[in-house]
Structures are given as C-alpha cells and as structure tokens.
C-alpha cells in the first residue's frame, strides 16, 4: 500500500492565483514562455522557466538560470504573492474541461514507494532531461511542479473528497488556459486528513505516473542526494503530487509527424504489412484502436495491421508500437524516436487540422494519427513492469504549475 501525506504548501495569495498559475514548464518553449510573462510579473514561469528573465542569448541550462529561479521563488514569497502554510494540509484540485470534471487530492508521495515500484511508471526517462529538473529543484530546495499520479478508484476516498467539496468553499476558482476551470479547496481538518491518509495506506496498493516521469525521477534523485549528504529532512523524503482516480481521466490521441522524404513506392511497401483504405476528410480521425491514420499527398488513409503481423503482448499490440515497428523502424530506419529530429509529436488537443497543415505546408512529409491509448492499457503495462513507446499518452487538461510548491526544508550542516 502507498503512503500519501499532507504537507505545508507554498501557494498563491488568492488575489494573485489566476495570474500566478501557469502552463507546465515542459509544454511551452522559451519564446512562448517569454510571451506569456511579458505583461505578467506574477507568472510562475518566472520561476519554472526563469531564463525568461535573462538575456535571450543565455544558455537555458546555465548556472545563472537556476540561481534566478531560486531568487524569484524567494522574491515571490517576500512580496506576499506566494505564502507557505503554517501547518500540513491536503488540498483538493478540481479541473473542468470540455464538459468533463476530474478531482485530485494534492499531497506528497513517498520517494521510497517510487523506488520500490509501488508508484509505477510506463515510460523511460532520459538523464539529459532529468538534469534540468534536478538542478532546478536542488537550487530552489523545492519540488517546483506537481507530478500527475493516478490510482484505481476507491469509493471511500471519492466520498471523503466529494463531501469536503460540498461543505466548503474553494480558495481558488478561476478559468485559465484552454477554457479550463480550476478550483482548489484546503482540507484543514486533521481528522479528515487522517482518514484520507489511512485510506491510501489501507486501500491503494499502487499509484501510477500519468504525466511527469522526468520530474518524478528528478525528485527522487534530489532526495537521494540529500540523504547521502546527511541533509535530508522528513518532508524531503517525499515529492509533490496530485492523485486522481483513474476513471475520471481522459487520454487524448498523441500523433506524429515525419519530417523526411517518404521512401519510394511508399504505398506498396506499407501494403506488405497493412490493409490500406483511402478515406474522406470528415472520416480522417481513427475511431477505434488498431486503425492508424496516414496523411500525405493531399489524401488521408486508414491502415490496419494485417492479422498475421499482430503481436499478442501488451506493448507490441499498442498502436504506437505498431507505428514504431512497421513504419518508423522498417521504412525510415528511425530506431530512437526520443532523439530523432526527423520526428515531431503533436498532442491531440491541437486537432487534426494541425497535422494536415504541417504536411500541406511542406513542414512534414507524413502525418500519423492514432487512436488514444486507454487508461486500462496504461495500468496493465505498468503493472507488468513494461514500458510503452515514447509519447504514447497525452493527458488533458494539464495541471497548472504555481498553485502548489513543496518546500524540501533541507537541513543545514
């Protein structure tokens, strides 16, 4: 069973919450981040992407960037824009998006549970990407962005959370990016906190990383660094998380663009492994697993792997695996999609027109549209200790950064 605890959040003064809350650092590039902070001194991107406050030519991984992040975090607190709670709390975070609602519990999860695989992953991480967040957390002495966790629904946890929401007013209630409504409640009753904590310890055998694999691995490594140095605090043995019941989550499609010339006789070579049918534009989006959409030369196609090619293992049968094996590997010699600059990945929230426009403009030669991975597949792969292909899941709505920061309270030597 897993440990999930209340903590003393560093969080916004309600007067500034909407202006502080920002998109996650890893879904905006430097130009987009700079544009978002241009007229907003409160934006949390001043902390999460602190290079926006330095000259454009500054390397985003320079020492000055991490020093600036730490200074900005201190400055936000000195100005009263962010304040640290005086006692440990749970927090409830509700997001409403496209007619759907999901409600998570904000707390701290155990690094030990992650290392022991009670908090399970479904993606590999790259140390090159971890290094940035390791340095960011290390410099700020804080988990600066939450990890998005999920777990199999438990009625008692749902009831505790819904009862609290129904009887209390939210401390934050605002609409932000992509027309998403964000509401936050403080759970300050120690008895309710104890019941929630006990429910996780007694009823939740495992949690799963939905989004934030690199942040989780980085948080664990910062904690281990502190432990080795003899400066690890009790709270520093945990990391900031928002845990949602899996049935409330929605995974969007995660599509691909190929930015290199198509092989000669592309259709003929595809037909060795796929059944191929041209489709009209209004039918372009795959409507079931196993159907893979392709767009090139002003035409959409639906393809389906031939029965004798179909894998029977959990990972091999995923559409993302089929694309990797029979299109990327076989036709383009792309073996490492994480690092190959001939590929780009496009979250389904951006729509099919973006894929089509990329090919029509010449930016890409081929667009690949996938049916969304299911939460059942995610949990099954993680339970089996397997790994999905990169960019298999796109969760929406995104958790905003800046609403909760976890102070690691590192001991002084």
Image (cartoon, grey):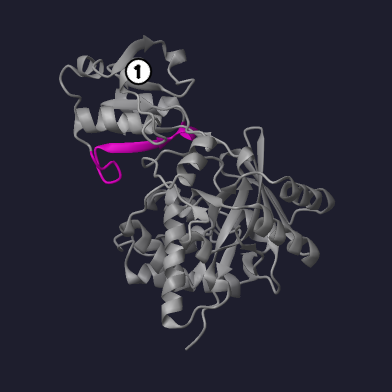
Report the label total.
Answer: 1
Task: Name the residue located 59 percent from the left edge and 39 percent from the top edge.
Answer: 249
- Which residue is farthest bottom? 413
Q: Is residue 162 magenta?
A: no
Q: Is residue 156 above or below residue 49?
A: above
Task: Name the residue located 74 percent from the left edge and 62 percent from the top edge.
Answer: 193
Task: Name the residue located 68 percent from the left edge and 57 percent from the top edge.
Answer: 202
Neighbour tally class for label 1: few under 14, some 14-19, many 20 plus, Cα within 10 Å:
few
Q: Is residue 93 left or right of residue 335?
A: right
Residue highlighted by disc 1: 307
In the picture, the quarter occupied by the N terminus is bottom right
Q: x and y percent of residue 160 in the render?
A: 77, 52
Closer to the camera in the image, 309 or 75 = 309
- Which residue is farthest left? 264
Residue 364, visible in the rendered structure: no
Q: Is residue 337 magenta?
A: yes
Q: x and y percent of residue 147 in the render?
A: 53, 55
Q: x and y percent of residue 107 in the render?
A: 63, 61
Q: Is residue 85 above or below residue 283?
A: below
Closer to the camera in the image, 103 or 220 = 220
In which quarter of the view is residue 320 placed?
A: top left
Give the structural element (helix, strand or loop) at label 1.
Answer: helix
Q: Is residue 41 above or below residue 276?
A: below
Residue 52, visible in the rendered structure: yes
Query: What's the magenta region?
Result: 335-350
In which quarter of the view is residue 7 placed?
A: bottom right
Closer to the camera in the image, 234 or 139 = 234
Closer to the camera in the image, 26 or 294 = 294
Q: x and y percent of residue 266 in the render?
A: 21, 19
């Amino acid at each position: 069973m897993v440990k999930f605890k209340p903590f003393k959040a560093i969080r916004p003064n309600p007067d500034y919450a909407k202006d502080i809350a920002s998109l996650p650092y890893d879904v905006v590039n430097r130009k987009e981040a700079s544009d978002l902070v241009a007229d907003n001194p409160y934006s949390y991107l001043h902390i999460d992407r602190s290079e926006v406050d330095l000259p454009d030519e500054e390397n985003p991984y320079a020492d000055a960037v991490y020093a600036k992040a730490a200074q900005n975090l201190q400055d936000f607190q000195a100005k009263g824009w962010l304040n640290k709670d005086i006692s440990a709390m749970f927090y409830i975070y509700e997001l409403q998006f496209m007619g759907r609602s999901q409600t998570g519990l904000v707390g701290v999860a155990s690094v030990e549970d992650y290392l022991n695989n009670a908090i399970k992953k479904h993606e590999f991480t790259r140390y090159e990407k971890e290094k940035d967040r390791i340095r960011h957390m290390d410099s700020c002495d804080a988990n600066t962005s939450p990890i998005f966790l999920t777990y199999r629904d438990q009625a008692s946890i749902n009831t505790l959370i819904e009862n609290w929401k129904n009887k209390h007013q939210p401390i934050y209630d605002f609409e932000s990016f992509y027309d998403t409504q964000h509401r936050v409640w403080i759970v300050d009753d120690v008895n309710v906190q104890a019941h929630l904590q006990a429910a996780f310890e007694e009823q939740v055998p495992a949690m799963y990383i939905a989004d934030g694999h690199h942040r989780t691995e980085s948080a664990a490594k910062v904690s281990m660094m502190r432990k080795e140095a003899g400066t690890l605090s009790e709270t520093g043995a945990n990391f900031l998380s928002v845990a949602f019941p899996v049935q409330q989550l929605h995974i969007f499609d995660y599509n691909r663009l190929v930015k290199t010339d198509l092989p000669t006789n592309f259709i003929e070579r595809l037909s060795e492994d796929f059944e191929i049918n041209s489709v009209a534009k209004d039918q372009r989006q795959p409507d079931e697993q196993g159907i893979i959409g392709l767009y090139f030369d002003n035409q959409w196609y639906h393809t389906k792997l031939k029965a004798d090619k179909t894998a029977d293992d959990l990972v091999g049968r995923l559409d993302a695996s089929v694309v990797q094996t029979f299109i990327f590997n076989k036709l383009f010699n792309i073996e490492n999609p994480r690092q190959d600059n001939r590929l780009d990945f496009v979250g389904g929230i951006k729509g099919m027109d973006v894929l089509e426009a990329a090919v029509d403009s010449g930016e890409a030669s081929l667009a690949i549209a996938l049916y969304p991975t299911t939460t059942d597949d995610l949990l099954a792969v993680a339970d089996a200790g397997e790994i999905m292909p990169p960019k298999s899941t796109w969760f929406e709505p995104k958790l905003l950064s800046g609403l909760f920061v976890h102070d690691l309270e590192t001991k002084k030597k």
